[in-house]
Image (tube, grey):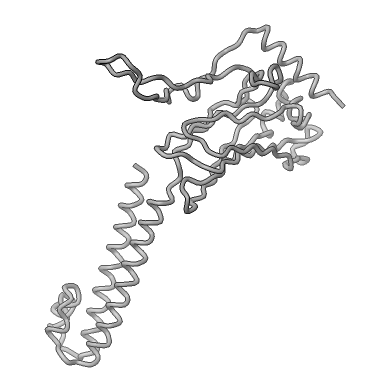
Amino acid sequence: MKTLKKLFFSIIIFGFCYSFEKILFGILYYISVGLPPNMISKTIFASITGSINNIYPNVLSIIILYVIQSITELILFSVFTSYVFAYLLNRNPKIIFPDKLVIRHRTSEGLKGKIYLCVMIGNKSKIKIHNISCTLSCYYIQENNPKKANGEFKMIKEQPSIDNYFRFSYELDNFPKKIIKDYIANNELGNKYDVIKIYLKGNTNTIGNNFLLEKTYKLKDIVIAENYIDLKYDFTNIFTGKPMFKKVKWKYIKKIENISKEQKQLIKKELWKIANSD
């Protein structure tokens, strides 16, 4: 829908410029020949229809202006078509950012049991996105003073390509201790001023089309929970009962799964340990 709106407005702008150019040159034709006032509408119409040389043949000023008009129209058409082509080719992918950032225990081999801050990114485009880097940056106040802040911390995770979705995980051991303390203690000023920003950068085709998208989260947007790992299901042939291909349950991409109070308390204790470590 956004694509259609932008194309519609670009057509309107092009139509306005094209019409203005036709009318302007019609007036210039009229002035250059020195015609009586009752001929101005006829001259403008001839400029619009491109028949000015038929009405005023072998007039040097008309020929010169006609050449200039043709070059101007060629430039207008070139700019318009290149803009449309570039926009269609370089549209941003349909990226889904999560509503919440999730603190959870990892289950991957070698990392099982460690707590991470996770960002589930969905790619709803019909094409893969490539050379992805997901940057997490923190801005937080120091000494509970909004005038004293730090925004230098960042962590970058990379992925060669994303087909449908991917969860980026960030080690909480490496996070600024102050922002972890603000989160655990539900610090009022921290809740107001501390933010975590997620920047997603990559490209969608072999000739470039780089994109950079971002979303900002407050501390209240961080939850201790779990989110779904397998969001795909088999689309089955109703006649044979055999799976044909996999589809993604997009409506569940942002869904958060609650964990027990005991698990939450365990993670909070681990967070306290990280926040108070040397």
Residue at left offset 39%, top offset 37%: 126
Q: Between residues 68 and 226, which one lies in front from this camera angle?
A: 226
207 lies above or below 277: below
Q: Residue 26, how many percent across, how many down? A: 22, 79
- Position of the C terminus by quadrant: top right
Tell me: 8 left or right of 44: right
Q: Quadrant of residue 73?
A: bottom left
Q: Between residues 132 and 48, which one lies in front from this camera angle?
A: 132
157 lies above or below 109: below
- Report the residue that reaches farthest toward the right: 278
Q: Residue 83, how many percent across, how many down? A: 38, 59
Tell me: 168 left or right of 18: right
Q: Between residues 208 and 25, which one lies in front from this camera angle?
A: 208
Q: Between residues 82 and 269, which one lies in front from this camera angle?
A: 82
Tell me: 78 left or right of 110: left
100 lies above or below 152: above
Q: Residue 51, how many percent across, how many down? A: 15, 78
Residue at left offset 37%, top offset 51%: 88
16 lies above or below 98: below
Q: How many marks are shown on the rendered structure?
A: 0
Residue at left offset 71%, top offset 28%: 171
Tell me: 152 left or right of 158: right
Q: Quadrant of residue 157?
A: top right
Q: Residue 270, how many percent across, how many down? A: 76, 17
- Position of the N terminus by quadrant: top left
